[in-house]
Image (cartoon, rainbow, N blue to C red):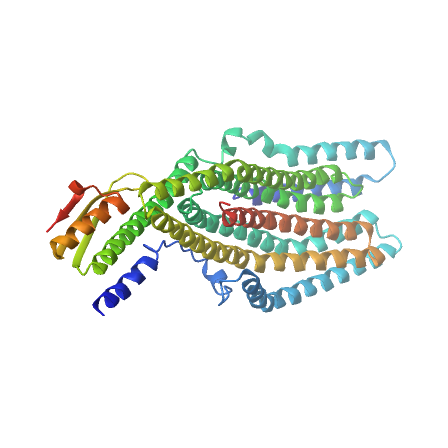
Amino acid sequence: MDALGPYLLRVTAAAILCAILKSLLGKEDTPAAVGKLLCGVFLAVTVLHPLTALRLGSLQVFSQDIAWEASQAVAQGESDAAQALRAGIKQRVEAYILDKAASLGAELTVEVTLTKDAPPAIAQARLAGRISPYSKARLSDILTRELGIPKEAQQWN
Amino acid sequence: MKKLLILLLVLPLMAAPARALDYTAPTPPPEAQALMPQTQERFGEGLLEVLKAVLPEIQPAVAEAAGICLALMAAALITSLAGTIPGCPKQAVGLAGALAVGTLLLRPSGALIRLGSQTVTEMSEYGKLLLPVMTAALAAQGGGTASAALYTGTAVFDAVLGALISKVTVPMLYLFLCLGVANSAVGEDMLKKLRDFLKWLMTWSLKLVLYIFTGYMGITKVVSGTADAAAVKAAKLTISGMVPVVGGLLSDASETILVSAGVMRSAAGVYGLLAILAICLGPFLRIGVQYLMLKLTAAACAVFGTKETAGLIQDFSAGMGMLLAMTGTMCLLLLISTVCFLKGVE
């Protein structure tokens, strides 16, 4: 853009110079026709001169990084969603177990661990609190049957 | 009673979204921020508020453009009268007319070209900030393939268009105006073909970029949208079948995430659309006012002015038209891209 000002000035000056020359040369004789031709050539050279400096390499406008940036943004969104999904599944499973424990008269705290798979599966359930042996057996059975948590993945404290 | 209390404590946990996904559109530059509406949830209402905020800012531009047009008419009238004086050379009159119109219009046109160029840069920069937010929000909603394709397409076309405007069309526009003045000064339409070629090249290049971009967006939508929808359905089925009895309950968790991500994407997208319009509308209307005023002046000058003077004013109005096309093309590119992100996975 810095070179644009002088260039425009050159074109304008050339045009004014041609206009003055043409008005001095008159209109309908041979020197006027030659003068007009020369003025045209002079103007065309002035206008088109910057094309000689054009390098196609400078027109490379987009970087190779765009695909990498796209994959980063997508990975960020997918990671956010996966984290939110893990938290959602953990919350719902824990709430479900607490609800079942409450219906059996037990007061428990529950912590569910999920696998790192996508989507995550339930890896382990830690249960602590006051619970009768009968209710414990019932709840353990519910965890296996309804949530697919095998007995060995159930930790009772 | 105790069971009921526990149930009351547990129920909200089951209903609440697991973890809020947070995708916020970036704030626009300060001048555009001042135009942003209070209500950003509904696009229609927001757009009206932006328009209401922009219109008072246009009034000084209208007055300024009207002043310039009056001066142009006066110059055209004087030039025309000078041409009727016996012995006054026609060439000199044409040269004086071109110089007068050029002097009156080059400075304001230069200011508007700089404004248009700056607006294009601001929109492009804002687009670069909005793009990752929309991409992440769409990917969180299960549109991984579509969002990657939309990001790549928008980023590439934004870069191409930005470079095309700043490095090619803006210098060409200066040259176009300069050739207009030179052609009018020289007379006999010596540079007319070259000037018309520049005009054609600028219009054609902008149109071409926009056509290819919309084509790319359309193809991307068809190709990747189906793949993403299938992937989302498969993920829901996997979660649902993962746990014997309450699989459906857990599948709802995934549905909640999708809805939450969708809400965030929609809010960010609408804000982004309004921000793009807030950046673009003011300069667009200012250039538009100048364009219309010059069109009107050229029509009026064709009645009483010389052919060269009216033609030169017409050239400046065409130049403003091309500046409008440049600003509008960049704005349209970003709007189309944001709408494509908003459309999401079906």
**Is B92 on the left or on the right of B271, as rendered?**
right
| Residue at the far right in the pictured view | B86
Q: What residue is drawn where x is 26% and y is 43%?
A: A148
Using the rendered view, name the quadrant where residue A100 is placed.
Answer: bottom left
Q: Nearer the viewer, residue B244 or A17?
A: B244
Q: What residue is drawn where x is 50% and y is 57%?
A: B270
Q: For residue B260, say whether it is visible.
A: yes
Q: For residue B16, say whether it is visible.
A: no
**Is B108 on the left or on the right of B238, as rendered?**
right
Q: How many marks?
A: 0
Q: Position of residue A63 (x, y in %)?
A: 44, 35
Name the quadrant of the N terminus of chain B. Answer: bottom left
Q: Is residue A40 above or below residue A98?
A: above
Q: Position of residue A138 (x, y in %)?
A: 19, 51
Q: Nearer the viewer, residue B276 or B32?
A: B276
Q: Nearer the viewer, residue A74 or B34?
A: A74
**Is A33 on the left or on the right of B140, as rendered?**
right
Using the rendered view, name the quadrant where residue A107 is placed.
Answer: bottom left
Q: Position of residue A150 (x, y in %)?
A: 20, 41
| Residue at the far front in the pictured view | A134
Q: Position of residue A96 (x, y in %)?
A: 27, 54
Q: What residue is drawn where x is 60% and y is 32%?
A: A51
Q: What residue is drawn where x is 67% and y is 55%?
A: B105
Q: Nearer the viewer, residue B73 or A76?
A: A76
